[in-house]
Image: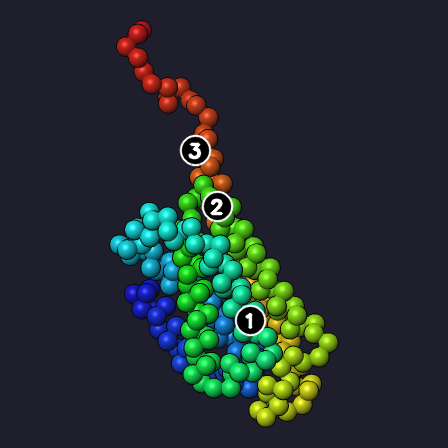
């Protein structure tokens, strides 16, 4: 049932891309956050609960791709928000939907590689989450504190006409990113680090009399 709900969220977000993605950076960012920060981790958790999930957890091929998944997700997100490329992306429905789908798939890959990390290697997942959160927040801060609207030429023919409105829309998009990044990546990093430290503490539990093997000598 959970997997159906998550799949429904993905379908709704992708189908609403033409509505939110055109004419507003904030609307575009809402779809980003919904797909990458909500739908992707939930779908990854749901996938790992399937019988196939046990195979994914035991297979080291997914966990070893964490650095590649981290870099790919960050690179594509930053690249698609370069003003020239962003203008080309939002110019057509097909390009916009394809970009959002690509970002969702990269986020799903990232979250799967994070969640299958062994508890003893929690620092790998925590480091990937920290780097991702920092760079995503950096993009959000850039949108908030940029001295001029970065996407003014992109939306000059849309319903947002004035520079002030475009600037406010861009700042709102940045604020949404600054809110979503700590709420997702930092929180997930804390949870995984806590789980890893508990696992290490269990493995290094002090020797007690009850754990000493008995011998036949009285």
Within 10 Å of disc 1 (Cα), the crowding (few <14, some 14-19, many 20+) is few
The secondary structure type at the circle numbered 2 is helix
95 over 79 or under it: above or below: below
**Residue that appears at 37% across and 76% down:** 11
Q: How many marks?
A: 3
Check whether the beta carbons of the residues at disc 3 and disc 1 lie within 8 A of each other: no
What is the distance, in whole Å, between disc 3 and disc 2 at their CAs? 14 Å
Disc 2 or disc 1, which is closer to the eye?
1
Query: Where is residue 142 drawn, in percent x and y?
Result: 66, 70
Q: Name the foreground residue: 72 vs 8.
A: 72
The residues tagged by marks 3 and 1 sit, at their Cα atoms, a distance apart of: 43 Å
Badge 2 crowding class, 10 Å Cα cut-off, few under 14, some 14 to 19, many 20 or more, is: many
| Quadrant containing the C terminus in the rendered view | top left
Q: Which mark is residue 79?
A: 1
The residue indicated by pointer 3 is 203
Mark 1 falls on what kind of element? helix
Q: Residue at x 67, y 90 (%)?
A: 162
Quarter of the figure with the N terminus: bottom left
**Residue at mark 2:** 122
Q: Residue at x 50, y 72 (%)?
A: 32
From the viewer's perspective, tell me whether residue 5 is left or right of residue 18.
left
Which label belongs to residue 111?
none
- Residue 130 picture quarter: bottom right
């Amino acid at each position: 049932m959970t997997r159906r709900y998550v799949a429904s969220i993905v379908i709704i977000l992708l189908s609403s891309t033409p509505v939110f993605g055109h004419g507003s950076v904030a609307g575009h960012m809402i779809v980003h956050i919904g797909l990458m920060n909500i739908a992707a981790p939930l779908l990854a958790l749901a996938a790992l609960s399937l019988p196939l999930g046990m195979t994914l957890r035991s297979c080291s091929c997914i966990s070893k791709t964490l650095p590649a998944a981290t870099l790919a997700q960050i690179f594509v997100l930053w690249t698609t928000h370069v003003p020239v490329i962003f203008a080309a992306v939002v110019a057509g429905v097909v390009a916009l939907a394809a970009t959002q789908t690509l970002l969702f798939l990269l986020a799903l890959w990232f979250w799967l590689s994070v969640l299958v990390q062994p508890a003893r290697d929690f620092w790998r997942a925590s480091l990937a989450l920290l780097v991702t959160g920092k760079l995503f927040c950096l993009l959000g801060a850039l949108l908030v504190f940029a001295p001029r609207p970065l996407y003014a030429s992109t939306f000059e023919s849309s319903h947002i006409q004035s520079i002030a409105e475009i600037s406010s829309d861009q700042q709102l998009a940045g604020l949404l990113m600054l809110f979503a990044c700590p709420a997702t990546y930092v929180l997930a990093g804390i949870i995984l680090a806590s789980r890893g430290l508990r696992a290490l503490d269990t493995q290094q539990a002090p020797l007690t009399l009850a754990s000493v093997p008995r011998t036949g000598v009285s």
